[in-house]
Image (tube, helix red, strand yellow):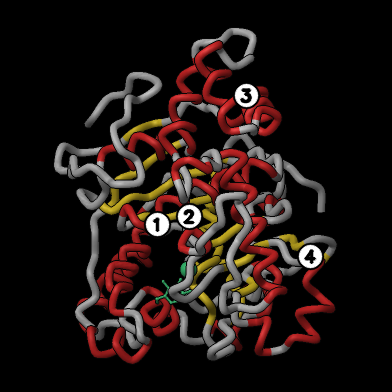
Amino acid sequence: MTTTLSTKTRVCFATLLTTDSYHHGALTLAASLRATGTAYEIICLVADGQLSRPTLERLQLSFDRVVNIPILQSSNMDNLALMGRPDLGSTVTKIGVWALTEYERIAFLDADTLVLDSIDSLLDMPPSGSEQQHSNEISIGQDIRPNGGMRNEGLLAAAPDLGWPDCFNSGVFVAKPSKTTHAQLLELLANQGSFDGGDQGLLNAYYSDWSRADHSRRLPFTYNTTSTSFYSYAPAFAQFSPAIKIVHFIGLQKPWKWHRSPDGSLHEGDVGASFSTFVEQWWKMHDKYVSLWSPDKGLYDSTIALSLNGCFENQSNNKPSEDANKLLLNTEMFDIVSSHATDNSWKRDGEYHVTDSAQDTANDSWGSFTPARDFTLE
Ligand code: GLC
Ligand code: MN
């Protein structure tokens, strides 16, 4: 199928933040998507009133749109405890994706995913006016999947979860927003709750026929390869890992929590050498576009990257200013930041939807911060 971007249909990639602590993930994910050269809009959903102002301002620099959505909280604490993740109760906020009916299609990615190769095929739509305009068909490489008549509207595709492959993993999915689906998901949450206490349990209860009803709704595992795959089936991992398009860092040990030596090298984690290659790739992306590795500061210093953004913003020739050069000389990463500076797609105009209820709490990894350009608070 050829890649056609219809001007009439609006589609986007989206992620979600309900807490400041995942902002490194969201920013690095956006960078990895841009690095694939995607033409599509990239938006960040944020839980209303939950994020600090510095985080929101930084998101606005990286995403095309930052959209406030109501925070939801699961009350199924026992189920969350069973999963060993009491922190995941607010992930049910994710069902807000279905309320965004200004989009025809949304490819959702958790903030702890990294895109390694173009995934635009998830959003490519048939040309407007063609017979297939309203089809839910998704093209995955050369594999054209027919619309097999789904029992539940609203979910176009997702990949199996390794823990229970009859369930889909809700870290990556393609949705068709729908007010009806959104209302039904809210109702299900209120009446039955979620069997895992998070969004995945809720969504799998709603789309309970996902594994059987329609093969077009099954994404290849390479669109959501989870860290656990390495030790579950190492030979398959070795065979298919070159085809991986999206890595999903599930579990507690997120890439941004790995320790690094002053030279930037990673300390051995507990996921095994093969998977740590992806953690290295995450950091490479992060260092190149989100922040600069700073030996003086220990972990990393996003504030330097931010001040550099400001320097570049005022340069008509896209070359770092003298101030930026001074900072760069200290970090020995001039080549990396130069490529950042010439990447025009990095900066795009976007909307900014933040209410005054957004907390103004200083986040220790950001420190004090001045936004690079003006924006309006709604
Ligand atoms: C799994 C999914 C994640 C979801 C969580 C809670 O970890 O990967 O996307 O938020 O379950 O349901
Ligand atoms: Mn995740």
Q: Which residue is mark 2?
A: 25
Left or right position of 103 against 346: left
Name the mark nearer the viewer: 4 or 2. Answer: 2
Whole-number angstrom distance, CA of label 4 to CA of label 2 = 31 Å
- Judging depth in this view, the residue of 274 and 156 nearest the camera is 274
Under mark 4, the amino acid is Ile
Look at the numbered discs 1 and 3 and tell me whether their residues touch, using CB distance below 8 Å: no
Give the residue furthest to the left: 357
Q: Residues within 10 Å of mark 3 (few under 14, many from 20)?
A: many
Left or right position of 358 against 299: left
Q: Would you say residue 134 is visible in this rendering?
A: no
Mark 4 secondary-structure assignment: strand
Residue drawn at the location 39% of the way across and 51% of the way down:
100
Whole-number angstrom distance, CA of label 4 to CA of label 1 = 35 Å
Mark 1 secondary-structure assignment: helix
Across and down, in percent, residue 233 comes to 72, 89
Mark 3 secondary-structure assignment: helix
Mark 2 secondary-structure assignment: helix
Look at the numbered discs 4 and 1 and tell me whether their residues touch, using CB distance below 8 Å: no
Left or right position of 142 against 11: right
- Judging depth in this view, the residue of 233 and 184 nearest the camera is 233
Whole-number angstrom distance, CA of label 3 to CA of label 2 = 21 Å
Across and down, in percent, residue 285 comes to 62, 47
Whole-number angstrom distance, CA of label 1 to CA of label 3 = 25 Å
Whole-number angstrom distance, CA of label 1 to CA of label 2 = 5 Å
Residue 143 position (above or below residue 367): below
